[in-house]
Protein backbone atom coordinates (compact mmCIF):
# COMPACT_ATOMS: atom_id res chain seq x y z
CA UNK A 1 0.00 0.00 0.00
CA UNK A 2 1.16 3.53 -0.81
CA UNK A 3 -0.03 6.48 1.28
CA UNK A 4 0.41 10.16 0.49
CA UNK A 5 0.15 12.49 3.50
CA UNK A 6 -0.08 16.25 3.00
CA UNK A 7 -0.09 19.25 5.29
CA UNK A 8 1.99 21.08 7.84
CA UNK A 9 2.95 24.64 8.62
CA UNK A 10 2.76 24.19 12.40
CA UNK A 11 3.44 21.45 14.89
CA UNK A 12 -0.34 21.18 15.30
CA UNK A 13 -0.52 19.76 11.78
CA UNK A 14 2.83 17.97 11.59
CA UNK A 15 2.70 15.89 14.77
CA UNK A 16 -0.77 14.42 13.98
CA UNK A 17 0.40 13.62 10.43
CA UNK A 18 3.42 11.72 11.72
CA UNK A 19 1.29 9.99 14.37
CA UNK A 20 -1.11 8.78 11.67
CA UNK A 21 1.78 7.48 9.56
CA UNK A 22 3.26 5.67 12.56
CA UNK A 23 -0.11 4.08 13.34
CA UNK A 24 -0.56 2.90 9.73
CA UNK A 25 2.93 1.44 9.81
CA UNK A 26 2.07 -0.45 13.02
CA UNK A 27 -0.99 -1.97 11.36
CA UNK A 28 0.58 -2.54 7.94
CA UNK A 29 4.39 -2.51 8.17
CA UNK A 30 5.08 -2.75 4.43
CA UNK A 31 3.30 0.55 3.64
CA UNK A 32 5.20 3.12 1.60
CA UNK A 33 4.78 6.77 2.59
CA UNK A 34 5.38 10.10 0.91
CA UNK A 35 4.69 13.45 2.57
CA UNK A 36 3.96 16.69 0.73
CA UNK A 37 4.69 19.93 2.57
CA UNK A 38 5.28 23.61 1.90
CA UNK A 39 8.79 24.81 1.10
CA UNK A 40 10.38 26.76 3.93
CA UNK A 41 7.93 25.50 6.55
CA UNK A 42 8.85 23.41 9.58
CA UNK A 43 7.56 20.12 8.14
CA UNK A 44 10.50 20.11 5.71
CA UNK A 45 12.76 19.57 8.72
CA UNK A 46 10.50 17.72 11.19
CA UNK A 47 9.14 15.01 8.87
CA UNK A 48 12.57 13.71 7.69
CA UNK A 49 13.67 13.73 11.34
CA UNK A 50 10.88 11.19 11.95
CA UNK A 51 12.18 8.98 9.14
CA UNK A 52 9.76 9.90 6.35
CA UNK A 53 10.40 11.32 2.88
CA UNK A 54 8.85 14.70 2.06
CA UNK A 55 8.62 16.87 -1.05
CA UNK A 56 8.01 20.61 -0.74
CA UNK A 57 5.67 22.77 -2.82
CA UNK A 58 5.92 26.57 -3.27
CA UNK A 59 2.42 26.99 -1.83
CA UNK A 60 1.81 29.59 0.91
CA UNK A 61 -1.04 31.28 2.70
CA UNK A 62 -3.12 34.16 1.39
CA UNK A 63 -2.32 37.66 2.61
CA UNK A 64 -5.14 39.40 4.45
CA UNK A 65 -7.19 41.24 3.35
CA UNK A 66 -7.80 38.91 0.40
CA UNK A 67 -7.75 41.73 -2.18
CA UNK A 68 -4.11 42.46 -1.29
CA UNK A 69 -2.11 42.70 -4.57
CA UNK A 70 0.42 40.21 -3.22
CA UNK A 71 -2.20 37.48 -3.48
CA UNK A 72 -1.77 37.40 -7.25
CA UNK A 73 1.62 35.76 -6.66
CA UNK A 74 0.05 33.50 -4.00
CA UNK A 75 -2.51 32.27 -6.57
CA UNK A 76 0.21 31.66 -9.15
CA UNK A 77 2.15 29.61 -6.59
CA UNK A 78 -1.01 27.66 -5.71
CA UNK A 79 -1.66 26.66 -9.32
CA UNK A 80 2.01 25.81 -9.74
CA UNK A 81 1.83 23.68 -6.59
CA UNK A 82 -1.26 21.80 -7.81
CA UNK A 83 0.55 21.00 -11.10
CA UNK A 84 3.60 19.79 -9.17
CA UNK A 85 1.42 17.74 -6.82
CA UNK A 86 -0.22 16.05 -9.82
CA UNK A 87 3.19 15.03 -11.14
CA UNK A 88 4.23 13.75 -7.70
CA UNK A 89 1.05 11.66 -7.53
CA UNK A 90 1.56 10.27 -11.05
CA UNK A 91 5.08 9.20 -10.07
CA UNK A 92 4.27 7.83 -6.60
CA UNK A 93 0.89 6.26 -7.51
CA UNK A 94 -0.67 6.36 -4.01
CA UNK A 95 -3.64 4.17 -3.11
CA UNK A 96 -4.94 6.87 -0.79
CA UNK A 97 -4.14 10.43 0.28
CA UNK A 98 -4.52 12.02 3.71
CA UNK A 99 -4.85 15.76 4.35
CA UNK A 100 -4.19 17.12 7.83
CA UNK A 101 -4.46 20.85 7.12
CA UNK A 102 -1.96 23.53 6.24
CA UNK A 103 -1.02 25.21 2.98
CA UNK A 104 0.23 22.09 1.21
CA UNK A 105 -2.83 20.01 2.05
CA UNK A 106 -5.16 21.96 -0.24
CA UNK A 107 -2.88 21.68 -3.27
CA UNK A 108 -2.18 17.97 -2.72
CA UNK A 109 -5.81 16.98 -2.18
CA UNK A 110 -7.03 19.02 -5.15
CA UNK A 111 -4.46 17.15 -7.27
CA UNK A 112 -5.45 13.79 -5.75
CA UNK A 113 -9.12 14.43 -6.50
CA UNK A 114 -8.35 15.42 -10.10
CA UNK A 115 -6.44 12.15 -10.60
CA UNK A 116 -9.04 9.93 -8.97
CA UNK A 117 -7.09 9.15 -5.79
CA UNK A 118 -9.44 8.76 -2.80
CA UNK A 119 -8.59 10.90 0.18
CA UNK A 120 -9.30 11.17 3.89
CA UNK A 121 -9.57 14.61 5.46
CA UNK A 122 -8.59 15.25 9.07
CA UNK A 123 -10.17 18.41 10.49
CA UNK A 124 -8.52 19.20 13.81
CA UNK A 125 -10.48 22.30 14.80
CA UNK A 126 -13.98 22.95 16.06
CA UNK A 127 -14.57 25.44 13.24
CA UNK A 128 -13.74 24.21 9.75
CA UNK A 129 -12.03 26.58 7.34
CA UNK A 130 -13.41 27.35 3.90
CA UNK A 131 -10.74 25.26 2.15
CA UNK A 132 -11.54 22.11 4.14
CA UNK A 133 -15.25 22.66 3.63
CA UNK A 134 -14.67 22.59 -0.12
CA UNK A 135 -12.29 19.62 0.04
CA UNK A 136 -14.82 17.69 2.15
CA UNK A 137 -17.28 17.50 -0.74
CA UNK A 138 -15.22 14.77 -2.41
CA UNK A 139 -13.54 13.21 0.65
CA UNK A 140 -14.05 9.50 1.34
CA UNK A 141 -14.14 10.20 5.09
CA UNK A 142 -13.75 13.26 7.28
CA UNK A 143 -12.15 12.63 10.68
CA UNK A 144 -13.15 15.23 13.26
CA UNK A 145 -12.40 15.98 16.91
CA UNK A 146 -15.45 18.04 17.93
CA UNK A 147 -19.21 17.43 17.89
CA UNK A 148 -21.53 19.41 15.65
CA UNK A 149 -19.29 19.34 12.57
CA UNK A 150 -22.35 18.62 10.40
CA UNK A 151 -22.50 22.42 10.13
CA UNK A 152 -19.52 22.20 7.78
CA UNK A 153 -19.35 18.70 6.31
CA UNK A 154 -21.60 15.99 4.80
CA UNK A 155 -22.91 14.12 7.86
CA UNK A 156 -22.68 10.67 6.25
CA UNK A 157 -18.89 10.96 5.89
CA UNK A 158 -18.00 12.35 9.32
CA UNK A 159 -16.23 10.08 11.81
CA UNK A 160 -15.57 11.31 15.37
CA UNK A 161 -11.98 10.19 15.92
CA UNK A 162 -10.37 12.91 18.04
CA UNK A 163 -6.98 14.38 17.21
CA UNK A 164 -3.80 12.29 17.29
CA UNK A 165 -1.28 13.31 19.93
CA UNK A 166 2.43 12.65 20.27
CA UNK A 167 2.74 9.25 21.94
CA UNK A 168 5.62 10.43 24.14
CA UNK A 169 3.26 12.79 25.96
CA UNK A 170 0.96 9.93 26.94
CA UNK A 171 3.79 7.60 27.89
CA UNK A 172 5.39 9.95 30.42
CA UNK A 173 4.72 8.63 33.93
CA UNK A 174 6.92 11.03 35.93
CA UNK A 175 5.43 12.58 39.05
CA UNK A 176 5.08 16.38 39.05
CA UNK A 177 7.93 16.57 41.57
CA UNK A 178 10.22 14.37 39.46
CA UNK A 179 9.37 16.35 36.31
CA UNK A 180 10.13 19.68 38.00
CA UNK A 181 13.44 18.38 39.28
CA UNK A 182 14.36 17.09 35.80
CA UNK A 183 13.66 20.56 34.39
CA UNK A 184 15.76 22.31 37.06
CA UNK A 185 12.75 23.65 38.97
CA UNK A 186 11.83 23.56 42.65
CA UNK A 187 10.07 20.18 42.98
CA UNK A 188 7.69 21.32 45.72
CA UNK A 189 6.53 24.70 44.40
CA UNK A 190 3.27 25.45 42.56
CA UNK A 191 4.11 25.63 38.86
CA UNK A 192 2.65 27.26 35.75
CA UNK A 193 3.75 26.16 32.28
CA UNK A 194 3.37 28.97 29.72
CA UNK A 195 3.70 28.02 26.07
CA UNK A 196 3.09 30.03 22.94
CA UNK A 197 4.61 27.53 20.52
CA UNK A 198 7.99 27.60 18.79
CA UNK A 199 7.62 31.24 17.73
CA UNK A 200 6.03 32.38 20.97
CA UNK A 201 2.83 34.34 21.53
CA UNK A 202 3.45 38.07 21.82
CA UNK A 203 0.35 39.02 23.82
CA UNK A 204 0.88 36.11 26.24
CA UNK A 205 4.55 37.03 26.66
CA UNK A 206 3.70 40.68 27.25
CA UNK A 207 1.09 39.71 29.86
CA UNK A 208 3.54 37.45 31.72
CA UNK A 209 6.26 40.11 31.57
CA UNK A 210 3.82 42.65 33.00
CA UNK A 211 2.88 40.30 35.84
CA UNK A 212 6.33 39.09 36.91
CA UNK A 213 6.20 40.82 40.30
CA UNK A 214 2.68 39.55 41.03
CA UNK A 215 3.69 35.98 40.19
CA UNK A 216 6.85 36.18 42.28
CA UNK A 217 5.03 37.78 45.22
CA UNK A 218 2.54 34.89 45.09
CA UNK A 219 5.44 32.43 45.31
CA UNK A 220 4.53 30.81 41.98
CA UNK A 221 7.12 29.13 39.79
CA UNK A 222 6.80 29.62 36.03
CA UNK A 223 8.32 27.58 33.20
CA UNK A 224 7.95 30.12 30.41
CA UNK A 225 8.50 29.03 26.82
CA UNK A 226 8.90 32.42 25.18
CA UNK A 227 9.55 31.22 21.62
CA UNK A 228 12.28 32.43 19.31
CA UNK A 229 10.94 35.94 18.82
CA UNK A 230 12.57 38.41 21.23
CA UNK A 231 13.87 35.64 23.50
CA UNK A 232 16.58 37.89 24.96
CA UNK A 233 13.99 40.56 25.76
CA UNK A 234 12.06 38.27 28.11
CA UNK A 235 15.23 37.03 29.83
CA UNK A 236 16.22 40.66 30.48
CA UNK A 237 12.74 41.41 31.85
CA UNK A 238 13.08 38.59 34.38
CA UNK A 239 16.59 39.71 35.36
CA UNK A 240 15.49 43.34 35.73
CA UNK A 241 12.58 42.28 37.94
CA UNK A 242 14.88 40.15 40.11
CA UNK A 243 12.60 37.12 39.64
CA UNK A 244 15.15 34.64 38.29
CA UNK A 245 14.69 32.22 41.18
CA UNK A 246 11.02 31.68 40.31
CA UNK A 247 10.48 32.65 36.66
CA UNK A 248 12.35 30.49 34.14
CA UNK A 249 12.17 31.83 30.56
CA UNK A 250 13.42 29.58 27.76
CA UNK A 251 13.20 29.94 24.01
CA UNK A 252 12.34 26.28 23.49
CA UNK A 253 11.20 23.37 25.67
CA UNK A 254 12.56 20.14 24.21
CA UNK A 255 10.72 17.80 26.58
CA UNK A 256 7.07 18.78 26.41
CA UNK A 257 6.01 15.63 28.24
CA UNK A 258 7.99 16.68 31.32
CA UNK A 259 6.81 20.29 31.02
CA UNK A 260 3.16 19.20 31.10
CA UNK A 261 3.79 16.80 33.99
CA UNK A 262 5.55 19.55 35.97
CA UNK A 263 2.65 21.99 35.65
CA UNK A 264 -0.27 22.54 38.00
CA UNK A 265 -1.84 24.68 35.27
CA UNK A 266 -1.02 25.48 31.65
CA UNK A 267 -1.32 28.79 29.76
CA UNK A 268 -1.47 28.26 26.01
CA UNK A 269 -2.83 29.34 22.67
CA UNK A 270 -5.76 27.17 21.61
CA UNK A 271 -4.67 25.55 18.39
CA UNK A 272 -6.13 22.08 17.93
CA UNK A 273 -2.90 20.40 19.03
CA UNK A 274 -2.60 22.29 22.31
CA UNK A 275 -6.27 21.87 23.23
CA UNK A 276 -6.08 18.16 22.44
CA UNK A 277 -2.96 17.68 24.56
CA UNK A 278 -4.53 19.47 27.52
CA UNK A 279 -7.64 17.26 27.24
CA UNK A 280 -5.80 13.95 26.95
CA UNK A 281 -3.34 14.83 29.73
CA UNK A 282 -6.16 16.19 31.94
CA UNK A 283 -4.48 19.53 32.66
CA UNK A 284 -6.20 22.65 33.98
CA UNK A 285 -5.61 25.40 31.42
CA UNK A 286 -6.12 29.01 30.48
CA UNK A 287 -6.42 29.44 26.72
CA UNK A 288 -5.60 32.70 24.95
CA UNK A 289 -6.86 32.22 21.36
CA UNK A 290 -4.84 33.72 18.52
CA UNK A 291 -7.20 36.42 17.20
CA UNK A 292 -5.82 36.27 13.64
CA UNK A 293 -6.39 32.51 13.24
CA UNK A 294 -8.47 31.69 10.17
CA UNK A 295 -12.22 31.91 10.85
CA UNK A 296 -11.25 32.55 14.51
CA UNK A 297 -11.06 28.76 14.94
CA UNK A 298 -8.88 29.00 18.06
CA UNK A 299 -11.69 30.72 19.94
CA UNK A 300 -14.05 27.93 18.83
CA UNK A 301 -11.57 25.31 20.07
CA UNK A 302 -11.16 26.98 23.47
CA UNK A 303 -14.88 27.57 23.87
CA UNK A 304 -15.57 23.82 23.74
CA UNK A 305 -13.53 23.33 26.94
CA UNK A 306 -14.63 26.60 28.56
CA UNK A 307 -18.31 25.75 28.05
CA UNK A 308 -17.68 22.33 29.63
CA UNK A 309 -16.12 23.94 32.73
CA UNK A 310 -12.79 22.43 31.71
CA UNK A 311 -10.73 25.58 31.05
CA UNK A 312 -10.69 29.37 31.16
CA UNK A 313 -10.97 31.31 27.90
CA UNK A 314 -9.08 34.61 28.08
CA UNK A 315 -9.51 36.71 24.90
CA UNK A 316 -6.24 38.00 23.49
CA UNK A 317 -7.32 41.62 23.95
CA UNK A 318 -7.95 41.01 27.66
CA UNK A 319 -4.70 39.14 28.35
CA UNK A 320 -2.69 42.20 29.50
CA UNK A 321 -5.23 43.00 32.23
CA UNK A 322 -6.44 39.62 33.44
CA UNK A 323 -4.22 36.71 32.35
CA UNK A 324 -1.84 36.74 35.31
CA UNK A 325 -4.65 37.46 37.79
CA UNK A 326 -6.67 34.56 36.38
CA UNK A 327 -3.64 32.27 36.61
CA UNK A 328 -2.88 33.19 40.24
CA UNK A 329 -6.52 32.71 41.22
CA UNK A 330 -6.73 29.33 39.47
CA UNK A 331 -3.49 27.88 40.82
CA UNK A 332 -4.62 28.77 44.35
CA UNK A 333 -7.96 27.01 43.88
CA UNK A 334 -7.24 23.25 43.98
CA UNK A 335 -10.93 22.33 43.82
CA UNK A 336 -11.40 24.26 40.58
CA UNK A 337 -8.22 22.69 39.17
CA UNK A 338 -9.61 19.24 39.99
CA UNK A 339 -12.92 20.07 38.22
CA UNK A 340 -11.07 21.34 35.15
CA UNK A 341 -8.87 18.23 35.04
CA UNK A 342 -11.81 15.83 35.34
CA UNK A 343 -13.91 17.65 32.74
CA UNK A 344 -11.01 18.06 30.31
CA UNK A 345 -10.25 14.36 30.53
CA UNK A 346 -13.86 13.51 29.58
CA UNK A 347 -13.42 15.48 26.34
CA UNK A 348 -10.19 13.71 25.36
CA UNK A 349 -10.48 10.91 22.82
CA UNK A 350 -7.77 8.28 23.07
CA UNK A 351 -6.54 6.11 20.20
CA UNK A 352 -7.24 8.74 17.52
CA UNK A 353 -4.19 7.90 15.39
CA UNK A 354 -5.05 4.19 15.25
CA UNK A 355 -8.71 4.92 14.45
CA UNK A 356 -7.72 7.24 11.60
CA UNK A 357 -5.11 4.72 10.39
CA UNK A 358 -7.81 2.03 10.08
CA UNK A 359 -10.01 4.44 8.10
CA UNK A 360 -7.11 5.25 5.75
CA UNK A 361 -6.34 1.55 5.18
CA UNK A 362 -10.01 0.78 4.57
CA UNK A 363 -10.25 3.66 2.08
CA UNK A 364 -7.14 2.47 0.22
CA UNK A 365 -8.57 -1.03 -0.16
CA UNK A 366 -11.99 0.12 -1.28
CA UNK A 367 -12.61 -0.44 -5.06
CA UNK A 368 -12.51 2.81 -7.01
CA UNK A 369 -15.61 3.88 -8.88
Image (tube, helix red, strand yellow):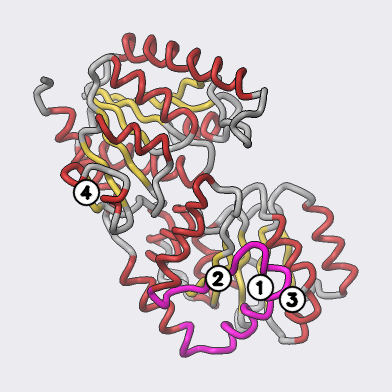
Residue 186 as seen in the image, left or right of residue 240: left
First reached walking from the N terminus: tag 4 or tag 3:
4
Q: Is residue 80 visible?
A: yes
Residue at mark 4 to residue at mark 1: CA–CA distance:
36 Å
Q: Which image quarter is the C terminus in?
A: top left
Residue 17 point in image, percent of width and height: 39, 39
What secondary structure is the stretch in magenta mostly built from?
Answer: helix
Q: Residues within 10 Å of mark 1 (few under 14, many from 20)?
A: many
Q: Residue at point 63% right, 48% down? A: 198
First reached walking from the N terminus: tag 2 or tag 3:
3
Residue at mark 1 to residue at mark 3: CA–CA distance:
18 Å
First reached walking from the N terminus: tag 1 or tag 3:
3
Which residue position holds label 4?
159
Tag 3's secondary structure?
A: loop
Which residue position holds label 2?
286
Of tags 4 and 3, the one toward the viewer is 4
Which residue position holds label 3?
246
Compared to 177, does 76 lie above or below?
Answer: above
Question: Could you tell me if the residues under marks 2 and 1 are in contact, i.e. CB atoms within 8 Å?
Answer: yes
Q: Which image quarter is the N terminus in?
A: top left
Compared to 238, does 75 lie above or below?
Answer: above
Q: Residues within 10 Å of mark 2 (few under 14, many from 20)?
A: many
Q: Is residue 319 magenta?
A: yes
Q: Residue at point 43% right, 63% down? A: 172
Q: Which mark is residue 323?
A: 1
Magenta-drawn segment: 308-337
Q: 177 or 167, which lies in front?
A: 167
Residue sticking out furthest to the right: 240
Residue 249 point in image, percent of width and height: 73, 62
Q: 58 or 70, which lies in front?
A: 70
Tag 2's secondary structure?
A: strand
Residue at mark 4 to residue at mark 3: CA–CA distance:
45 Å
Amino acid sequence: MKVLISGGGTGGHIFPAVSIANAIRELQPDTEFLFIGALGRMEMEKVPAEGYQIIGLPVRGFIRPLFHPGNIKVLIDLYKSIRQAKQIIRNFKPDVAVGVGGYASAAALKAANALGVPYVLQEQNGFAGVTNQKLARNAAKICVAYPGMERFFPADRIVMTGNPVRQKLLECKATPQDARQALGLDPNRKTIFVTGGSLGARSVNNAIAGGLKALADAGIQVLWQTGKADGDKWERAVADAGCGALIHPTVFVSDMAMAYRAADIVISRSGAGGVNEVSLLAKAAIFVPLPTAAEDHQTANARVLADANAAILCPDSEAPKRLVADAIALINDPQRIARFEANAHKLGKFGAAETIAKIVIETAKRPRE
